[in-house]
Image (spheres, rainbow, N blue to C red):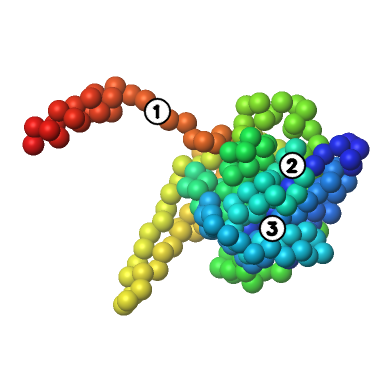
Amino acid sequence: MSDPDDLEILLTNDDGIHSTGLRALYDALSAYGNVTVVAPATDQSACGRSISHEVDVEERDLGYAVYGTPADCVVAGLAELGPFPDIVVAGCNKGANLGEYVLGRSGTISAAVEAAFFDVPAIATSMYVPAGDTPLSQLDLSSEDYAEATRVTSFLVERALEAGVFDHAAYLNVNVPVADGEPAPVEVTRPSKRYEMDAERNGDSVHLRDRVWESMDPETLPDPNGTDRRAVVEGRISVSPLTAPHSTNHHDALSALAETYTETITSN
């Protein structure tokens, strides 16, 4: 175990500073370094990388409560409120963040992306809760339920920096099953490409539905091997090494089109 004075850790989330998942990670990570909490004062789930121009801040028992988004928290924490960290940890989110389509939607992941733009390594940790038809907000989870999340996040915080993991990844998107006795195995994964959003109009409103969660049976799951969703549903810890900013793909078709722009516009 590392000397607790070795690491500076900035901890944030999108469920809010009073969430059980944040407290569980705070307690676990405090054994590995100095943990500064800068987290939203209220639930900011699914806010993406939304940023504010000005946010109010209050000091709480656990750290700083920011009346803003996870991205606000990371900027405020790195630039002003806390010691500049060796690593940023976001989580633990109640509910999984799986698939390519959540990378820009999740507040948890967006906090890690924001850290990456500061060139600070980051880990976003979320927990898959097979809730069925019960809304996650109605589930009462204990600190013990987050044992798998705290165990693997602590392991990565302690070892990933020295191992050179962040020489090849800007941040890690970690998804874990609910704790169930023995530690689950870790699988290095890629985000699933599944996207099953749809919408239904009802009078003056439109109901948006994410149908991905309707087909999470391990026996019939359509996601291929190697994806984050398959790993977690089958009981493994998913670790996806990701980059920010996203890469670009230069190709001849777009280059040729760009070359004709001025000539085409001026001839019309």
- Classify mark 1: helix, strand or loop: loop
Residue 142 visible, this orientation:
no
Label 2 environment density (alpha carbons within 10 Å; few <14, some 14–19, many ≥20):
some
Q: Helix, strand, or loop for circle 2?
A: loop
Q: What whole-number distance in Å separates the C-alpha atoms at marks 1 and 3?
A: 35 Å
- The image quadrant that residue 15 belongs to is bottom right
Q: Is residue 65 left or right of residue 201?
A: right
Mark 3 lies on residue: 39
Three-letter code, disc 2: Phe
In the image, is 49 to the left or to the right of 37? left
Spot occupied by residue 66 in the image (x, y as percentages of width and height): 66, 61
Q: Which residue is mark 2?
A: 84
First along the sequence among labels 2 and 3: 3
Label 1 vs label 2, nearer the camera: 2
Labels 2, 3: front one = 2
Q: How far from the left and from the top, in percent, is residue 82?
A: 75, 49
Q: Give the residue pinned by disc 1.
A: 249
Report how far apart the C-alphas of labels 1 and 2 lie in the structure: 33 Å
For the point 58% across and 38% down, the residue is 117
Q: Does dot 3 land on a helix, a strand or a loop?
A: strand
User: What's the residue at 43%, 62% (across, down)?
Assistant: 209
Q: Which mark is residue 112?
A: none
Q: Amino acid at mark 1?
A: Asn
What amino acid is at disc 3? Answer: Ala
